[in-house]
Image (cartoon, rainbow, N blue to C red):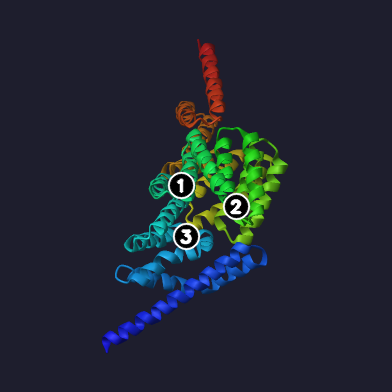
Amino acid sequence: MILAANADWRIAQLRHCRYYEKVLRNANRLFEQGGAALQAGLNIYDAELANIESAQGWAAAQSATDAEAARLCSELPDAGNYFFDLRQHPRERVRWREAALAAARALGNRAAEAVHLSNLGIAHEALGAPERASEYYAERLVFARKMGDRHGEGIALNQLGGVLAALGHPRKAIDLCEQSLDIALEVGDRRDEGIALGSLGIAYASLNELPRAIELYELRLQIAREVNDRRGEAIVSGNLGNAYYESKELQRARESYERALSVYRELGDQRGEAIALGNLGNVLSDLNEIAAARTLYEEALAISQSIGDRRSEGGFLGNLGLIYAAMGDDRKAIECFDHRIEFARETGHRRGEGFAQFNKSLALHRLGETATARDLAESALSILEQIEAPYSKVVRERLDEWQIAQNQKMTLHR
């Protein structure tokens, strides 16, 4: 009787799990259609989330001894990949994908294993661990080449390129993303072609080649609209805003950021919403609307803290530091910059660390702590030169100004 009851329970759980896998896939298909269907898909996901999580929990717990449970454990994350990217905390995504990866390996499903490796990299990037992410992407790349999977190879090359750009290696990133673009053109995948163009744009922007970056972003935006990639449209709108902002075209930057914010809110993408709010804050700060900028930064910081996005949290703290500096509160600014430096080191964000060190040095110099300020600015210069950041020129010029002023002061005292 006990064995029969256990068998009946297994059958009931499998039915439950299969049913909610189908619900999730149907909702995912609606989301892909965009427009009103997109919102309908989100509504289904939100309404059924508890049941979906219950199904995954059972499948993960049984996957080591039950082949059908293992199949479901492997397939559930992909059944709702759009929703999990938007709504699931990165730590939860890691947990689901690790269980799915183990299940795929137990089943010998090489294609699923490759997909899970990529998504584990994406989740670790969202957690602010780019070096760990690069390990998953590199493993996916080796895997794809062994299998002769050109499409998978292109995806892995692009993902590796993106993380290398974030780690301060833009020229290596360009090489990998160009290889990814070639493969996308070879296999005729317009969506991947657009993604590769966007990644190339980011790499060129990091080298301050802004006209080239804008050109690439515009092509990326065109393809995103063509294939109805709303999230891609939001991402590239934000990147376009960044390029216009760096080019001092504040009105065009503001328009691009507002477009990104609108789409992110439509999708329920809190991470994207926070980034767009922070970028809009940058524009308002430059327009000297300091109070409004501070409000946007605080909203963005609250969202990033609530979703565990450490990388963005550090960036918003750095922005708040600049606001406090503009308000004349250098001690509060330094406190923010210290947190920014801590988070940048934690997430391997060299560019962010260099900028935060330089901004802190400026605040220290204003407070009369000139020796400490100079040491910190030199450290910032070292970092920015290592990653070929064009802003290193500004840091060097400021160090030269301080040295001239010090020499003049010493001359007057003789």
Residue placed at 37% from the left, 60% from the top?
109
Instruction: Indicate the quadrant containing the N terminus: top left, top right, bottom left or bottom right.
Output: bottom left
| Rendered residue at 58%/43% (across/down) | 197
Q: Is there a contact, CB below 8 Å, between mark 2 and mark 1?
A: no
Question: Of helix, strand and loop, which one carries label 1?
Answer: helix
The residue positioned 34% from the left and 68% from the top of the image is 63
> What is the quadrant of residue 64 in the picture?
bottom left
In this rendering, does residue 19 appear at all? yes
Where disc 2 sits, the SS reads helix
Q: Which mark is residue 232?
A: 2
Decide if residue 50 is in sight here.
no
Kindly identify the amino acid type of the residue bearing the numbered disc 1.
Answer: Glu
Circle 3 sits in a helix, a strand or a loop, which is it? loop
Residue 408 disc label: none
Mark closer to the chain start, 3 or 1: 3
Q: Amino acid at mark 2?
A: Gly
Q: To which quarter of the image does residue 219 belong?
A: top right
In this view, the residue farthest toward the left is: 2
- Closer to the observer: label 2 or label 3? 2
Q: 298 or 44: which is nearer to us?
A: 44
The residue labelled by disc 3 is 89
Residue under label 1, please give it: 153
Q: Position of residue 60 (x, y in %)?
A: 36, 68
Name the residue furthest top.
414
Can you give x and y, in whole percent of width and height, for residue 257 in the image?
Answer: 66, 48
Q: What is the C-alpha distance between the residues marked 3 and 1?
A: 27 Å
